[in-house]
Amino acid sequence: MAIRFYTADRSCTLKSRIKIKEWLTEAAEQEGFGIHFLSIIFCSDEYLYHMNVKFLKHETYTDIITFDQSTSKQIIDGELYISIDRIRDNAKSLGLTFTNELHRVIVHGLLHLCGYTDKTTNNKNSMTGKEDFYLSLRKFL
């Protein structure tokens, strides 16, 4: 099992990386998944925008893009590309801390890798409920 953090063109200082890895592993296990490999890549708005256009044909800014590379059920292999710029802006506009918004987006990406979608209002509400639940399990803040 490996969860690794990388930077593309934006750095992000994370406190308690080991505890974040444990938290994500626990969340995946509660969803019935193991994590084989998970890369979390921090980048800028522009970097993620260009990925969104190139790979998903979406001409919009976003906070996260999730790539599922799993080849077997119940085992996670994937990448989460996260815009630090978007996290910072969203946290400010929502009145949240940067860390809280970052953790929400990370677990949101993990939930996508567990098969959850947010295409409909019901799906989005379900994901938000799951995000809230897993955020409540954090033991490192």
Image (cartoon, rainbow, N blue to C red):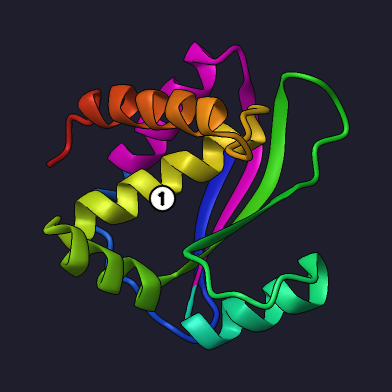
Is residue 104 in view from this perspective? yes
Q: Residue at x 54, y 38 (%)?
A: 110
Kind of residue at disc 1: Val
Residue 32 belongs to the span the image colors magenta:
yes
For this rendering, which residue is in front, 21 or 113? 113
Residue 131 belongs to the span the image colors magenta:
no
- Magenta-colored span: 19-42
> Is 55 on the left-hand or right-hand side of 131?
right
In the rendered image, the vertical position of residue 107 relative to residue 30, given as above or below: below
Tally of numbered tags: 1
**Quadrant of the drawing holding the C terminus:** top left
In the rendered image, the vertical position of residue 60 relative to residue 113, given as above or below: below
The x, y position of residue 87, in whole percent, is 33, 66
> Is 58 on the left-hand or right-hand side of 103?
right
For this rendering, which residue is in front, 61 or 6? 61
The x, y position of residue 66, in whole percent, is 64, 52
> Is 87 on the left-hand or right-hand side of 63?
left
In the rendered image, the vertical position of residue 107 relative to residue 46, given as above or below: above
Q: Which residue is drawn at 68% across and 28% down?
A: 115
> Is 69 on the left-hand or right-hand side of 36?
right
Which residue in the protein does label 1 denote?
105
Q: In which quarter of the image is residue 73?
A: top right
Q: In which quarter of the image is residue 131?
A: top left
For this rendering, which residue is in front, 59 or 46? 59
The x, y position of residue 112, in whole percent, is 61, 37
**Secondary structure beneath disc 1?**
helix
Dot 1 surroundings within 10 Å: few (below 14), some, or many (20 or more)? many
